[in-house]
Image (spheres, grey):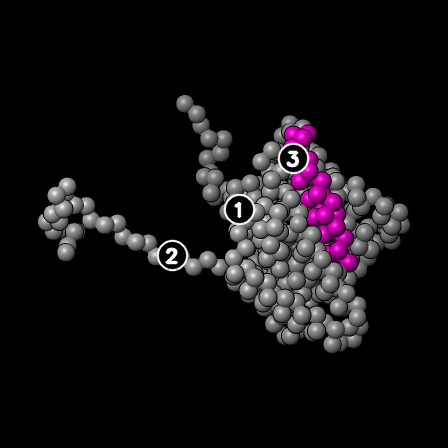
Amino acid sequence: MTFRSSPIPPGVLTVGAVTFTVFAWASAFVSIRSAGAAYSPGALALGRLLAASLVLAVLLLVRRQGLPPRDAWRGILVSGVVWFGGYTVALNWGERLVDAGTAALLVNTGPILMALLAARLLGEALPPRLLAGMAVSFVGAVVVGLSMSSGNGGATSLLGVVLCLLAAVAYATGVVAQKPALSFGTPLQITAYSCMTGAAICLPFTGQLLDELPRAPVSATLNMVYLGVVPTALAFTTWTYALARMPAARLGATTYAVPAIVVLLSWALLAEVPGWLTLLGGVLCLAGVAVSRYAPRTPRTPPAPATPADGTPLAPTKGNRT
């Protein structure tokens, strides 16, 4: 007789992993905004990824998981360079120029890009609703860009919008690359070695980190460590756990809740709230994502009543009325 390793049903574990990931990633936008006041984008990315790599290396030793199979390395390297490295630097830079809520609204156009890349690279269908959703999200991004460029320092704010959109592209690319790798390695292996790859890519920022670390306030350094431990090491592991058990596009849709959580956290902790025009553009971005992922339910056709071999209909009975 075999026993399950955990008394908790797998479906409950998956939902729990997704929920933890969403809240951890929402908190990351606020922590980046706070730590970014003391650390430059590259230094903050390197410090975050080094802290995450240390935690993940310990988890690998505790779980006795070594190197992943050779077939997983292509996805690991692409995900590590583009998502863990490129996304982190772009988002850190972008959040120096726009508030946390606006950054979250823009980055969460990622599920549309994810579906588009999956169609192009994995041969998935490209339904008309995806194209319609992309159009709506594009309009939303334009509205956000116009709202950010209409005030003081508009040029740098517009640059922040572009950087956040680049982060969304990196996020989508990383997920699509990571999905096939999970067929060969465990979620912890894929996360750990992707993170270490990202840290290696950010090593050119070592001089900046060493220069800024002694002068940074303790709160900023603690935020950097928090970013490495919770939203990166733990949340990326729970993300890959869920990704191994759900379609990438469906899992990406769960991040719809992130911007709302970020706006509430940034309002409570940073006293930041995006302007009404920015919020309108952000809502359009998310509406486009929702349109792209909407699938109308097909009505179920009730089964035809059974008939004898001679074609004579059955006599009506209780619960089977004609």
- The amino acid on which the numbered mark 1 sits, given as a three-letter code, is Pro
Magenta stretch holds residue 233: no
Identity of the residue drawn at 26% across and 49% down: 303
* Front position in the image: 236 or 286: 286
Work out whether mark 2 precedes mark 1 in sequence or the reverse, and give the earlier one.
1
Q: Residues within 10 Å of mark 1 (few under 14, many from 20)?
A: few
**How far is mark 2 from mark 1, CA to CA?**
20 Å
Q: Where in the figure is residue 251, as x and y percent of width and height?
A: 55, 50
Q: Residue furthest front?
A: 310
Please provide the residue range marked out in magenta: 67-93
| Magenta span main SS | helix
- The amino acid on which the numbered mark 3 sits, given as a three-letter code, is Ala
State if disc 1 and disc 2 touch (CB < 8 Å): no
* Residue 132 visible: yes
**How far is mark 1 from mark 3, CA to CA?**
18 Å
Residue matched to label 1? 247
Residue matched to label 3? 72
Identity of the residue drawn at 27% across and 52% down: 302
Residue matched to label 2? 298
